[in-house]
Image (cartoon, grey):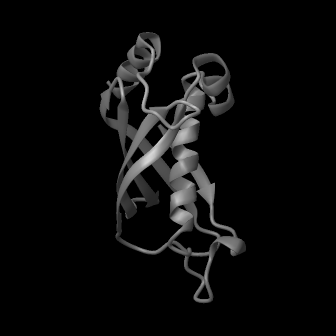
Amino acid sequence: MNYKIKVYYEDTDASGRVYHSNYLKYLERGRSEFLYKLGYNHQNLLQSLNFYFVVKHIDIAYKLPAYFEDMLNVETKIHVISKVKIIFHQSIFREKDLLIDSKILITPVNENGKIVKMPIEMLDKLQLSKI
């Protein structure tokens, strides 16, 4: 799944480059859009399924910088999935240039922070999106 983002002035540092932590926001938006396209949103997950996703681990490689007013493409794919985790492979491109390459582990937890299993219907839908 692809998601387009424009770099605004507020995203940059004094050099006009995107500040490193803002890439995490872009990646979060990519994962959220991925779930939205499958019919899920974070509020409904908590209200109807009694869990929400939390980030457990991030592995990120900064390859090239993005700059003010660049148009970026956040590419989000499921790399590994099980009942208790999803590892996303996410990349950020400016045209064909790879800027960011990451793997992000998320896990479903209940309101007490305990890891829970995703329902089989959701797991099946996510598995199908991996293909």
Please determine whether, in this image, residue 38 is positioned above or below residue 103.
Answer: above
Question: Which residue, as the protein is rendered here, is positioned at the far bottom?
Answer: 14
Q: Position of residue 51 (x, y in %)?
A: 55, 27
Q: Which residue lies furthest to the front in this view?
A: 112
Which one is in front, 69 or 58?
A: 58
Q: Which residue is drawn at 58% across and 47% down?
A: 29
Position of 30 compared to 105: left or right?
right
Residue 89 lies left or right of residue 17; in this view the side is left
Q: Which of 111 and 37 is in front in this view?
A: 111
Residue 13 position by quadrant: bottom right
Residue 116 is situated, as x and y percent measured from the top left of the image, at 43, 26
Kindly identify the residue that appears in the image at 59 percent across and 22 percent down. 50
Residue visible at 35% across and 21% down? Answer: 127
The residue sitting at 57% across, 66% down in the picture is 22
Residue 129's spot in the image, x, y percent? 40, 24
Towards the viewer: 108 or 127: 108
- Where is residue 117? Give x, y as percent: 41, 22
Q: Quick one: quadrant of the C terminus?
A: top left
**For residue 85, which quarter of the picture?**
top left
Can you say whether 116 is above or below 87 in the image?
A: above
